[in-house]
Image (cartoon, rainbow, N blue to C red):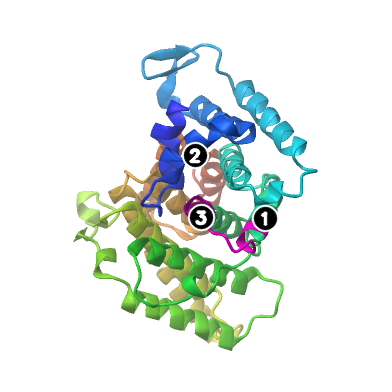
Amino acid sequence: MRYFIDELACWFDLCDPERHFALVVPQRSGQCPALLNAIYTASARHLCRSEQYKKENTVEYLEKRLTNLQIETAVEYHSRCIESLVSVSDDPEAIYDENLLVASIILRFYEEVDAPFCGGDWETSLQGTQVFIEAQASSGLITSLRQAAFRVAYRQEVYMSFIKQRPFYLPLSGEEYHSLEPTDDHTWAHRAVVHCADVLMYCYGDHPSNSSDYDSLVEYHNGWTRLRPKSFEPIFEEPPDPLAGKVWQEMWFLSDCHVTAVQHFDLSKILLAVYNPRIPRLGPSHRAATKRIEAEVSLIVKRLCGIAISNRRAPPAMNTACMAIAMCGEQFTDFSEQKSLLDILIYTDEKHAWPTREIQGRLKDAWGWSSEDNL
């Protein structure tokens, strides 16, 4: 529980000024076995994956050797959590229980930590999260914890949809998050996440896409950029200096919610560039457009990486950069840039216990790296 509060809650509380996952969820877990075991599942798995806590084949955290903590421990807690969820499945009121909603979201985090960026069926908690969100969103009662949970679920689904190039499966948010009216910074940040979800649905949804839908997305994108508060501007910015070995631009932001917003807007920007319906499909114009898009996407990926490196206090920022690297990294041809991309993947895997080894291998193969290059 201490590990969850100190190390993992920040992954969930990015756009939550009240820090529900750090301050409220642990207290709620005392009355909800499913929630308690979900917390234990995520904490045990993440601790076991974190290289920095491994000492002589055991896990050591806060100077305490956890000799009984193994990968199997997380599996056991996961089984207990599922058992608790199954035990209330016959209760028609259970789907309105926000504690169970939070438990399903934490289990989804566990699935993300337990699987690589590419391949495998690791979305078993998605269906549960969908059921809880659809029921609780339609109930008309949106508590502060419920709202915080919805926002986390949206970011998780954006991650999954972007990596798997599939539709966004959660119900899209209402008018408040498609508005550009003045509001607090955390709501502005969530608007950026919802906009990314809208773009994902345009790109990968089942309905036919058209130029009108694309133009509406670009219009909102430009409007958000134009009308967002000044607090979303970097408080410090410095360009890259390749001659000095500095590959990434430096961009410091005021808080984690600003980092989250800007990075999600950059993900949207990548998708809007690639899925522009006016791109010529054949002929010399197509080749020129393809080169232009690759150059634009490369700049956005570099920006995403620079933001992540400059704001390491927000671990999910590194994950977002890794998402972009996973999907766009193959197009980088400069060796120093390739190595810097790989360094981010390695850092995220070792420091944040986020699995990137499969994508590391795939990129090395795509780049044609030899064993000597890996040294």
Q: Amino acid at mark 3?
A: Thr
Rendering coords of residue 19 (x, y %):
40, 46
State the residue position of label 2: 25
Nearer to us: label 3 or label 1: 3
Q: Nearer the viewer, residue 93 or 162?
A: 93
Which residue is depicted at the point 67% across and 47% down?
A: 123
Q: Amino acid at mark 1?
A: Gln
Q: Nearer the viewer, residue 79 or 203?
A: 79
Residue 116 lies in quadrant: top right
The answer to whether the residues at label 1 and label 2 have Cβ atoms under 8 Å apart is no
State the residue position of label 3: 143
Rendering coords of residue 298 (x, y %):
41, 64
Residue 292 lies in quadrant: bottom left
Dot 2, crowdedness within 10 Å: few (<14), some or many (≥20)? many
Figure check: 88 above or below 170: above
Q: CA distance from mark 2 to mark 3?
A: 13 Å
Main SS of residues in magenta: helix
Check residue 137 for magenta coloring: yes
Which residue is depicted at the point 52% across and 79% down?
A: 287
